[in-house]
Amino acid sequence: MSKFKNKNSLALPAISTASLPDIVFMLLFFFMVATVMRQNSLLIHNELPIADQVEKLDQKDLIMYIYAGKPSSRYQKNMGDTPRIQLNDKFATVSDVKAFVLAEREATREALIPFMTTALKVDKEVHMGLIDDIKKELRAVNALKVNYTTRKGSALEN
């Protein structure tokens, strides 16, 4: 007598999924480490001026960013066309700059406070009067290390 083989025994064996959780967690950790989170979302139009003598700042965690410019198109209906100040993720007035700087200093270790820098990311269309008002508020809080953020290029292109 001959033996008959079942067709199911000729099928491929099932793929082992025992290592699947390990692979998923490795991918999860990779993306958690490699992803850079955005600090602020811009509410203003911010086209930086161009400068030819540019230096890169070393420690990004010791920088406070103050943005200035016209509100973006989706906020112009409510805010108007005049240049505004943005601190973190909200619009602010010049008088709010003091409280912002003091709050940023509170969040920083005491030994690092003298090394903190205020970076002004100002649109190239903003008048100097607003920048001067911001600088007066910074002087009142003794935040004297000020950086103007620009793009690299020839200053004649402005």
Image (tube, helix red, strand yellow):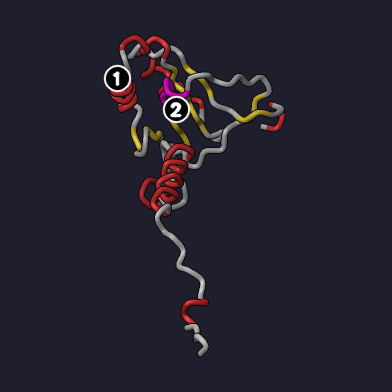
Q: CA distance from mark 2 to mark 1?
A: 20 Å
What is the secondary structure assignment of the residue under circle 1?
A: helix
User: Image height check: is 136 above or below 85?
Assistant: above
Q: Which mark is residue 67?
A: none
Q: Nearer the viewer, residue 20 or 135?
A: 20
Residue 157 in the image: state x and y as whole percent: 70, 32
Query: Dot 2: what SS?
Result: helix
Based on the picture, tell me whether residue 38 belongs to the magenta stretch: no
Residue at 51%, 30% (x, y): give it.
Answer: 127
Callout count? 2
Q: Nearer the viewer, residue 26 or 12?
A: 12
**Amino acid type indicated by mark 1:** Leu
Q: Give the crowd class for mark 1: few <14, some 14-19, many >=20 residues within 10 Å.
A: few
Return the residue at label 2.
Answer: 130
Q: Position of residue 35 (x, y in %)?
A: 47, 40
Q: Is residue 58 above or below residue 13?
A: above
Against 119, residue 142 (above or below) is above
The residue that label 1 is drawn on is 102
Q: Position of residue 38 (x, y in %)?
A: 44, 39
Part of the protein shown in magenta: 60-65
Q: Give the farthest residue toward the front.
A: 1
- Mark 2 or mark 1: whose residue is earlier in sequence: 1
- 61 in magenta: yes
The residue lying at 39 percent from left, 52 percent from top is 21
Residue shown at 54% from the left, 20% from the top: 57
